[in-house]
Amino acid sequence: MRKELLAIICVMLPLLVAAQEATSIFNFLKIPMSAHVAALGGDNVSLKVDDPTLVFCNPAQAAAVNDNSVNLDYQTYVGDTKVMGAAFVKVFSVRHTVALTGQVFDYGTMDETDEDGNVLGDFSAKDMAFSALYSYTMGNHWVGGATGRFITSKYADYSSTAVSVDLGLHYNDDDNGLSLGFVMKNIGAQLSSFYEDQKENLPFDMQIGLTQKMQHAPFRFSITLKDLTRWSDDYYFNPEGKSSIGRKLTNHIVAGVDFLPTENIYVAAGYNFRRANELKAAGGSHGAGLSFGAGLQANKIKAGVSYAKYHVDANSLLFNLSYSF
């Protein structure tokens, strides 16, 4: 099974890299649905804890979740946008785990105007995604997983649908507190487009990450490298107009740390370099790129809350609540 997963990755990688610089739609898929991950900077594919929200990040992480776990999410976002999510994880055996997820971005109702600003009526806008995933434990250390997703967006009279796949691997060494993750996200294509005969790309993202728990201190560090197929200057927003190797490298880094005062409580903080650069360039500086959060991880009940900033004029709070039956 491990060889087959690696073969799939090797075959698909050249095809994905070929379209790496294209613009994309359905970018709501980039917003984290996990309060823990949001607190750690917004991206994490290597963390191994019993948390059903992690299946949104890496399908292989489902193997660490308790049987019959249900999760509900709610997030405050820009303006009146309502962000909601849900996940259900079912363990069929030591090796086989499946999960179902859903996420909705409801942007509310807005005025419809003509070119002179006259109000003609109103319209609504909404993004949704529904997924099914499967993870397979390949031994004491390796887990592989795949997610199949249906995506739909509707803005007034314009709509689009798409299908996508996430492929993930996870390695863990519990004795040394080390875990690694690798994911290719949003491999897919539109089924129908907003405009006739105008197909657009999904927000493909290749990520690799490492999480290390300290043996003699209550800390756990994570680092994630994202957007690993995008390296051209067109990808980097550089208001000074200067080419910088350092800027290119840091724009791919998300770093986070957990403080673990007890086995069931975490306090997390993270820094997303690309988000910080974009917010600063847009006029924001206070707390740009920083995120914080805390959570409870008991055997049956898990809860988390995080703070992050995705827009210069709005803060975001994400709440997770999970229960294992």
Image: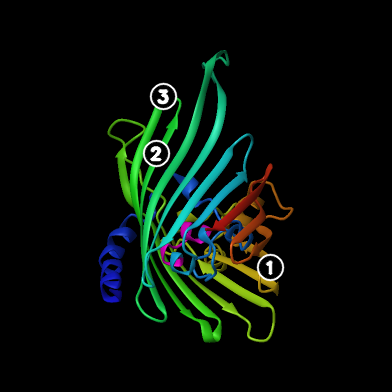
Give amino acid for label 2: Thr
The answer to whether the residue labelled 2 contacts the one labelled 1, judged by CB atoms less than 8 Å apart, is no
Q: Residue at x 39, y 50 (%)?
A: 131
Q: Is residue 210 above or below residue 29?
A: below
According to the picture, the residue beneath numbered tag 1 turns out to be: 265
Q: Residue at x 28, y 64 (%)?
A: 14
Residue 152 is labelled as 2
Disc 2 versus disc 1: distance between alpha carbons? 36 Å
Residue 240 seen from this side: no
User: How far across and down, in percent of the image, does residue 288 sit?
Assistant: 68, 55
Q: Is residue 325 above or below residue 96?
A: above
Residue 183 seen from this side: yes
User: How far across and down, in percent of the image, does residue 184 sit?
Assistant: 39, 62
Q: Quadrant of residue 2?
A: bottom left
Give amino acid for label 3: Asp
Disc 1 versus disc 3: distance between alpha carbons? 46 Å
In the drawing, does residue 313 fall left or right of residue 209? right
User: How far across and down, in percent of the image, does residue 190 sit?
Assistant: 32, 42
Over which residues does the magenta segment extend? 53-61
